Image (spheres, helix red, strand yellow):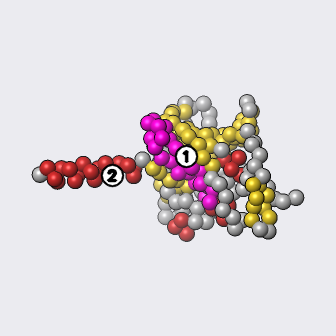
């Protein structure tokens, strides 16, 4: 009996550790997947906080390159209904998506580092639950993510849509859009 109880407790502990990490694709309001997707892990470095990877591997692969991902952190929060298209409970995080994009120039030989600190911030509210999709591929329910782009004290853009249980190139779904932040992955060589 004791050995069985120990096995069940161990199994629950292992299962809970895997449940703390989640991956979602970003879908537009019309349902197309963006090339970046979010990977979120709870409490890895600090209890109550979320580690974020804004995965850009599919975005970079469009250029035949391997480049950096956006990274950041966040916390559980609730956004009041102030007129934005996404409200309610979720995780609010900021990441360095814009700086990850500004890695360098594309060349015939790949890219080289020419990083410039942009000072631009990508802040996202994600509801941590993928929307349901019907047999025709249409998303249902309310929008489940919104991102705000800012620099200094100026908010210069937003984007929002559905969370998908599919990520770009997974399950036969190709990214039909650029990134959620609306910037190209790298600056073309002049």
Looking at the image, which is closer to me, 178 or 188? Answer: 188
Q: Please say if the residues under marks 1 and 2 sit with CB atoms less than 8 Å apart.
A: no
Q: Is 181 positioned to the left or the right of 44 in the image? A: right
Residue 121 against residue 186 in the figure, above or below = above
Residue 94 against residue 58 in the figure, above or below = above
Residues in magenta?
33-57
Residue 14 falls inside the magenta stretch: no
For label 2, the SS is: helix
Q: Quadrant of residue 120?
A: top right
Q: Is 69 positioned to the left or the right of 115 in the image? A: left
Residue 47 falls inside the magenta stretch: yes
Q: Quadrant of residue 79?
A: top right
- Residue drawn at x 38%, y 49% as measured from the top left: 17
| Label 1 crowd (10 A; few <14 / some 14-19 / many >=20) | many
Looking at the image, which is closer to me, 174 or 188? Answer: 188
Q: Earlier in the sequence, mark 1 or mark 2?
A: 2
- Residue drawn at x 65%, y 54% as measured from the top left: 68
Looking at the image, which is closer to me, 6 or 176? Answer: 6
- Residue drawn at x 62%, y 33% as measured from the top left: 83
The residue that mark 2 highlights is 14
Q: Is 11 positioned to the left or the right of 122 in the image? A: left
| Label 2 crowd (10 A; few <14 / some 14-19 / many >=20) | few
- Does any portion of residue 184 appear in the rendered image? no
| Mark 1 → mark 2, Cα distance in angstroms | 21 Å
The image position of residue 4, as x and y in percent, is 17, 54
The image position of residue 89, as x and y in percent, is 49, 37
- Does any portion of residue 46 appear in the rendered image? yes
The residue that mark 1 highlights is 52
Q: Which dot marks residue 19?
A: none
The image position of residue 15, as x and y in percent, is 34, 52
The image position of residue 172, as x and y in percent, is 55, 69
């Amino acid at each position: 009996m004791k050995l069985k109880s120990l096995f069940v407790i161990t199994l629950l502990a292992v299962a809970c550790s895997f449940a703390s990490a989640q991956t979602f694709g970003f879908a537009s309001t019309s349902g197309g997947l963006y090339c970046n997707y979010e990977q979120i892990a709870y409490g890895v470095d600090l209890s109550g906080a979320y580690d974020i990877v804004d995965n850009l591997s599919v975005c970079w692969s469009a250029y035949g390159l391997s480049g950096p991902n956006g990274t950041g952190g966040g916390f559980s929060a609730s956004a009041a209904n102030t007129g934005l298209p996404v409200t309610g409970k979720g995780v609010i995080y900021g990441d360095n998506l814009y700086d990850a994009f500004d890695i360098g120039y594309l060349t015939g030989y790949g890219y080289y580092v020419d990083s410039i600190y942009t000072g631009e911030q990508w802040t996202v509210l994600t509801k941590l639950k993928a929307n349901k999709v019907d047999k025709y591929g249409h998303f249902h329910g309310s929008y489940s993510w919104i991102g705000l782009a800012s620099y200094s004290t100026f908010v210069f853009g937003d984007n929002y849509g559905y969370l998908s249980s599919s990520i770009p190139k997974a399950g036969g779904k190709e990214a039909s859009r650029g990134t959620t932040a609306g910037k190209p992955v790298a600056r073309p060589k002049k």
